[in-house]
Amino acid sequence: MLSLLLPACNRGRGRVQEIAYVSVPQAILRDHVSAVFSKTGVVKNGDRVQILERERRFARVRTASGAEGWIEQRALAPQSVYDGFQKLIQQEQTAPVQATGTTRNDTNIHLDPGRETEHLYQLNQGSKVSILKRATAEKTIAGGMAKPASKNESKPAPLQEDWWLIRDADGRVGWVLARMVDLDVPLEIAQYAEGQRTVAFFVLNQVTDGDKKVPQYLVVLTEPKDGLPFDYDQVRVFTWNVKRHRYETAYREHNLNGVLPVTLSHEDFGKEGTLPVFILRVKDDDGNLSERKYKMNTPIVRRVMAPGEAKETSAPRKKSRHH
């Protein structure tokens, strides 16, 4: 009799705990998997639970507070997904912020770009996020697959859509659909976008105009299209004219095969003093990545050539003014 009882007592002790995380905004724990049930608890997005058993579409879980109950398995993400997000946080902890934005709607944070990729956390409408990087992913057609081409038609190229790698206020990092985020572009420069999409924006420095400090900006832009093979293809620098009390376009450059991130710093240029510096990463026709450094000695922006680097022969661009 004793020999039969001992294995039964030790049966659960060596079992490896299966851990999962709640991937929906909120879910009720129920005492039975049936149409009629009693509520045994509530779990929220990101909560860690221990899975006790599984049955078809449901899993019985135990929360950190000790509450137990059944929950739909589709509302749970496995430990591997949680670990993936933790790895992203570590990888991107020093990534420079390219812009800030606000979510248009409630939206999922994905582990990789793409609507069908794993997700765990959710952002509420109006959440503030920092933009770190951009990527593209094939757009999923509602209903599963696109309409097949006829015999006389060539197969259409898959539609691509843009994704942002973001960091939220809680320090979580992941991918969100770009169209779900409105960038917080300052209104005083957003009006000069000329139909282009702002990808990133930065304050280079501030100038004094009377009793106020006015920021001067670097903005990187592109066509208002998803799926482009570059992150941006043009840059502009907006400086403040203290005599006319208005922004002017001090510098613009087009036809760039630009890659995020753009980085900013300050550098000592001797007689010119310490000036704001920004570095663009661009690809050539062969896909080789190089860096271009620029300095701003208000209101003049110039390329800083590396030792041995040939100077560009293109004519300087005219400065345009905004009222």
Image (tube, rainbow, N blue to C red):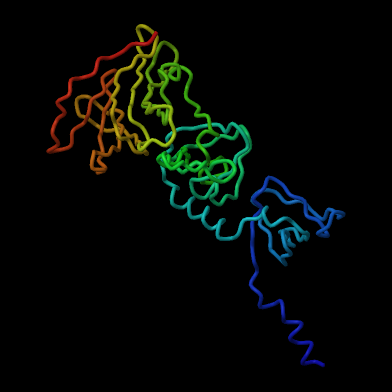
| 98 relative position to 317: left or right | right
Residue in view at x 38 percent, y 23 percent: 217
Place of residue 25 in the rendered image (x, y in percent of width and height, measured from the top left): 68, 45
Q: Is residue 173 above or below residue 57?
A: above
Outermost residue, front side? 151
Q: In which quarter of the image is residue 197?
A: top left
Residue in view at x 48 percent, y 40 percent: 163
State the quadrant of the N terminus: bottom right
Place of residue 207 in the rendered image (x, y in percent of width and height, measured from the top left): 37, 18
Q: In which quarter of the image is residue 254?
A: top left
Place of residue 134 in the rendered image (x, y in percent of width and height, measured from the top left): 43, 39
Q: In this view, does 216 lie above or below 43?
A: above
State the quadrant of the C terminus: top left
Q: In this view, does 236 lie above or below 175?
A: above
| 166 relative position to 32: left or right | left
| 176 relative position to 215: left or right | right
Q: In which quarter of the image is residue 66?
A: bottom right
